[in-house]
Amino acid sequence: MKNLDVICFGEFMMRLDDASQSIETSNPDEVKFAGSEANVAVSLATLGDSVGYVTRLPLGIVGNAAVHRLAQYGIDTSRVLRSEGKIGSYFLEQGASRQKSKTVYDRDNTPFSSLAPGIIPWRNILKGAKVFHTSGISAAISQSSADATFEALDVADEMGLTVSFDINYRSALWNYGADPKETLVRMMQRCDVMFGDVIEFEYITGKRIPFEATSADYKMDLKAYEEWCKELHALCPRCKRMIIGIRSQPEPRHHVLTAIMIADGKMMPSVIHDIKDIVDPVGVGDAFAAGSIHAALHFADDPQRWVDYALAAATLKNQVPGDFNLATDEQICQLVRS
C-alpha cells in the first residue's frame, strides 16, 4: 500500500431521492453513492490531496459499483474490505417552502454494521499516512462498529497520526443502547482536529447561543461564543483546532452560514456568507470538514486562513448537486479572497 496524506473511515451507502416528490410518492430514477466520510474523501481528492478510504462493502455488482465510484474521483480503494450482505442506503426528501428535509435510513445488517475489532489491519492501513479521519456516525450504527472505530482511534494515536473527527450526531442512528453523548465525548477527547455543526456542540454542552441571521449583516454575540469556546477547550484539551459551523435557515433554499475556530484555546471568527438559491445542502458539513483537513495539511500555522478556507468550501457545496463537493482549490481560494 502506498503512503497517503489522509485515510478516511466510514460507511459508504446508496442515496435515493426525488427532488419533486415525498418519500411516500417518489419514484427515484437515479442512484447516487454517499456517506459522510466518503464525501470528505472525494472533496480532499478534488483538492489534490492523496486520500484512501476504509470501509466494508458487500460482494457483488452493487459493491463493485460503489468501489468504482470512489476510484473515479481518484481515491485509493485498496483498503476497502468486502463481505456478504447488503449495502446501506438512505432516502432524502428535499425541503420545500416551510417543509424541512427528511431522511430515512436503512443501515441494519450491512457489512459495515458487523465490523468488530481485529477485522481491519489498522497498522498496515495507516502506515505512512498523516491524518486519520472518521466521525460519530461510525460509532452510531452498532456496538461492534463503535468498538472497531475506537480501535482505529487508538492505533492512529499510537502511530502518531493527526486524528480528525467530525461529531456528526445523528439521533436516528443511535438505536443499540449506547449513550450517544458519552460515546461522542470520548471520541472528541481523542482527536487533534474537530469540527461539527453548532447544533451538535449544543447537544454536547447543553448550551445554546442564538444565531438568527437573515443576511450577512447579522451581528454575532462574539463575547458569548468566546466564553463557550473556553468551556469546549476545557472539555477537549487535547484538541488543537476545533471548528464550529453556525447556520441559520430563513428558508429551505436560503441559508446564512459562518464559522468560528478554537485555536489553542482562543476563539477566531470567520465572515458570514449569505447563500441564496441553494441547489443541494446535503454534505455541506462534510465539505467543511474536508476544507479543514486540507488546511491542516497545507497551512496549519495560519488559523484565520484555515477557518476561512473551511467555511468557503462549505459555502460552495450548497451549489453542487449530490453529496460530493467538487469545488476546486482555486474556486475556494477565490471565494476567500472576495
Image (spheres, grey):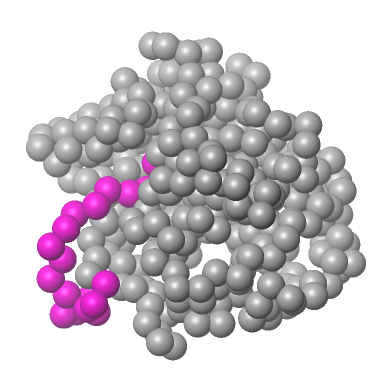
Residue 195 is left or right of residue 19, and the answer is: right
Q: Locate residue 306, reporting x and y percent.
A: 70, 42
Question: Which corner quadrant of the image does residue 264 belong to?
Answer: top right
As drawn, 287 above or below 41: below
Taking the image as shown, residue 26 lies to the left or right of residue 40, namely left
In this rendering, position of residue 122 left or right of residue 21: right
Measuring from the top left, give residue 269's x and y in whole percent.
78, 57
Residue farthest toward the bottom in the current orientation of the protein = 98
Q: Which residues are magenta?
A: 19-39
* Residue at the image point whose x is 44% and y is 88% from the top: 98
**Residue 84: image x %, image y %?**
16, 35
**Which residue shows up at 35% across the image and 68% down it?**
103
Depth order, front residue of 239/140: 239
Residue 17, by quadrant, is: bottom left
Is residue 37 visible to us here?
Answer: no
Q: Residue at x 53, y 23 (%)?
A: 5
Look at the image and tell me in which quarter the C terminus lies.
bottom right
Residue appearing at x 55%, y 77% in the figure: 249
Confirm whether the magenta stretch covers residue 243: no
Observer-nearest of 104 and 121:
104
